[in-house]
Amino acid sequence: MTKSIDVSTDVARLRKDMVECRRDLHAHPEMAFKEERTAGIVAKRLKSLGIAARTGVAKTGVVGLIKGALPGPVVALRADMDALPIIERDKKPYRSGTPGVMHACGHDGHVAILLAVAEVLEKRKKNIRGSVKLIFQPAEESPGGAEPMIKEGALKNPDVDAIFGLHMWNDFPVGRVGVKPGPLLAAADKFEVTITAKGGHGAAPHQTADPILAAVHAIQALQALSSRMVDPLQPVVCSVGRIKGGDAFNVIPNRVEFAGTIRSFDPKLRPRLPKMVRDLIGGAVHGLGAEFEMTYTMYYPATINDVEMTKVVDGVAEGLVGKTRVDRNVQTLGGEDMSYFLNEVPGSFFFLGCRNEKKGLCAPHHSDRFDFDEEALPLGAEMLLRTVESYLARAK
Ligand SMILES: [Zn+2]
Ligand SMILES: [Zn+2]
């Protein structure tokens, strides 16, 4: 299927290398801020290519710099390196050798792609007008490595003018690329609620203030967030994923806890959401004579692509995979801390199709059978290379 997509000889030559690197990382997954082996491999490879690199940025992050022969802007490319706390179910030869840790999101592929891109760019640097910063980031899955990397100067010295990155995307078959200006991924926030009330005998509910009933009302009331409180043309998701309360079938407890996630795209809407959530829960809970406490934690902001920078990626994608294989409707309420970089400098994050039904590679991201079609690796490398070259040529 990807036969008709031609990558450059430089990338084709590194195809086997990318597969080997990715499989090695897959077999040795590391959790957030513990990506020591991975960072070691990255640093060693950059050094062997003659690329100057700073290590230990936000604990395990690595920042490399390729200086082109000619002066020009600084463009950054970002790859995340961390794995997830998942037990891998597959029996493939390169399955995780670390119990309970798995590369189930494709970050192993992101690292392999960026290392190949580094090698090709270093080779082509005579013709590069500007510099390319290579950002290998820890802890994307949580608690987030982008923000501390920025605080430790990853975008400074030299100052970055634009940033690009990709994510393996299993919703798309290999060969398809998702490009979208504006909001691509959501802000992902968390709320945790504890309802307290007077418990008692299940046969005498009138002597109690039932926190279970209050929790039911509160959770139902939260459905009004998207249906009645927020403009219906503005996506917002509220999902309760945990609820705990009571021990016995015939006892009304005095405490119920629940927690959920709120996802949104609009940076202007987001700061208004905690009050809306609080008001909805309060209305439901207080009416039944119960009390509540809530903590609302803001995690990653929405990932918002710059319109001009996305045009660069769009042009490259169309040139590489063809018009019909560029998907411009892609958007997800998942979260990504690439958002922090994009809030600092203009840039664009895009999705790289990696699904292949025929090869049985269709388990979703974060599943214990996730894997991707390795044909996506050379395509990802070619996409990033051409994006850098197209951006720098444009900035001339
Ligand atoms: Zn993930
Ligand atoms: Zn991911």
Image: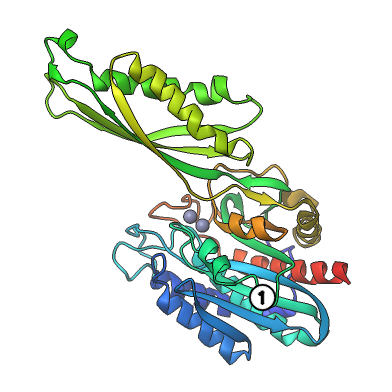
- Tell me residue 137's x, y (percent): 53, 68
Q: Nearer the viewer, residue 263 or 124?
A: 263
Give the number of callouts: 1
Which quadrant would the C terminus be assigned to in this image?
Answer: bottom right
Q: Amino acid at mark 1?
A: Lys
The scheme the figure's colours follow is: rainbow
Residue at point 58% right, 84% down? 53
Q: Is residue 128 left or right of residue 79?
A: right
Q: Is residue 146 visible?
A: yes
Question: Where residue 56 appears, x then y in whole percent?
Answer: 48, 78
Spot occupied by residue 249 in the image (x, y as percentages of width and height): 13, 22
Seen at 43% across and 52% down, the residue is 366
Evaluate whether residue 354 shows in this view.
no
Q: Is residue 196 above or below residue 146?
A: above
Residue ID for mark 1:
133
Q: Position of residue 16 (x, y in %)?
A: 57, 78
Side of 327 relative to 101 (left or right): right
Please state if 330 lies on the left or on the right of 23 as rendered.
right
Left of 90 or right of it: where is 246? left
Crowding at label 1, few (<14), some or many (≥20) Cα neighbours within 10 Å? many
Give the answer, above or below, for where 377 lies relative to 258. Answer: below
Please give the name of the residue rendered at 68% of the width and 61% of the height, measured from the top-left corner: 2
Which of the image's four quarters has the N terminus?
Answer: bottom right
